[in-house]
Amino acid sequence: MDVTQLGEFGLIARIQQTLSSPSNPDVLVGIGDDVAVLRADSDRVWLATGDIQVEGVHFMQAAVTPFDLGRKALAINLSDIGAKGGRPRFALVSLALPRGLTVEFVDELYKGLKREADDFGTVIVGGNISRSPSGLFVDIFLLGDAPRNNVVLRSGAHVGDAILVTGTLGDAAAGLALQSDPGLSATPTYTLTAKAKLALPTPRVREGEWIGASHLATAMLDVSDGLASDLGHICDASQVGARVLAGTLPVDEENRALARSAQGDEWSFALHGGEDYELLFTAPAANVQAIVGGLANATGTGATVVGEIVPVDAGRRLILPIGVDVPLGSRGWDHLADQKRGFQ
């Protein structure tokens, strides 16, 4: 079987089955989540994650500065640690370099990595360098930590919980569409906003750490593959269903218009575009006011209620503003599936 037939998440499940072994008491969460949770002592845990940027898949050299590439490569890892309620600490950066790459490119790449690391109190402590037969690879392993009781997993959602998301959705997907399709257009202001969200996402580390410390949320992850797909991960892990209200999604009107033009569906970028790196989390309805107000006061970031957790047999549904109830779907980004994603 070709790996594209199995897909990214099917392959992860297969690997998980292959590696199954007697449980290690120090591994609290292992394969199958974005972050491994490892016991440090009785009160704290280590959080371990890794992500890679591959030329020709995630970026094109001609379309991104090495400084911005460095920042984004680390930011998407920082986002994973934040989405567990943790604090990023130490990073290892491995590079596979193609022939002809300049030393100046690598200098600027590391300046971008260091800038992002400094912004979030992270130290780059090592890595590895190898030759690549084709494009550039930037592979990062990131280690964070957290009080054990502050870690928010994707498996804790309960029926009746509200579904919330920070910031806005779909802007990175709109930026990608505007960059790759000359037939699309938006106002100069929104074009700059959308392209900036694509090129330099803001990892919600401080927000995630605050949510974890508040003990008000029940499940959380970051929106990297699209809200519908990532909410599906919470539903799978928590054995629940979900109702999302399209009319409450924090989506710019221009984003909806662009999605309508590019995809024929005004909610497409918000639900399936990916690369938002906002936090998607659940919380008992009684905690919503405290979370929304407290998060805004502590970090300046807003959060919006976009739906509700329902019993698993109710499925995953999207309620359109006209009252029509349709399947939410889950066609987010899959790195191994036969699908195309443009380059930044």
Image (cartoon, rainbow, N blue to C red):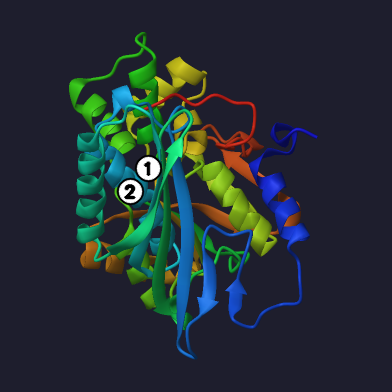
208 vs 226: above or below? below
Indicate the quadrant containing the C terminus: top left, top right, bottom left or bottom right. Answer: top left
- Residue most extreme to the right: 1
Quarter location, residue 56:
top left
Q: Residue at x 71, y 77 (%)?
A: 23
Going from the N terminus, do you reach mark 1 or mark 2 first?
2
* Residue 199 visible within the image: yes
Q: Are marks 1 and 2 in contact (CB under 8 Å)?
A: yes
Residue 157: image x %, image y %?
Answer: 58, 65
User: What is the three-letter code of the residue carrying label 1?
Assistant: Pro
Which of 160 and 186 lies nearest the eye of the viewer?
186
Q: For mark 1, give the secondary structure.
A: loop
Q: For mark 2, give the secondary structure.
A: loop
Residue 306: image x %, image y %?
Answer: 47, 49
Residue 143: image x %, image y %?
Answer: 41, 67
Q: Residue at x 29, y 49 (%)?
A: 202
Q: Residue at x 33, y 35 (%)?
A: 198
- Identify the residue position indicated by label 2 in the image: 167
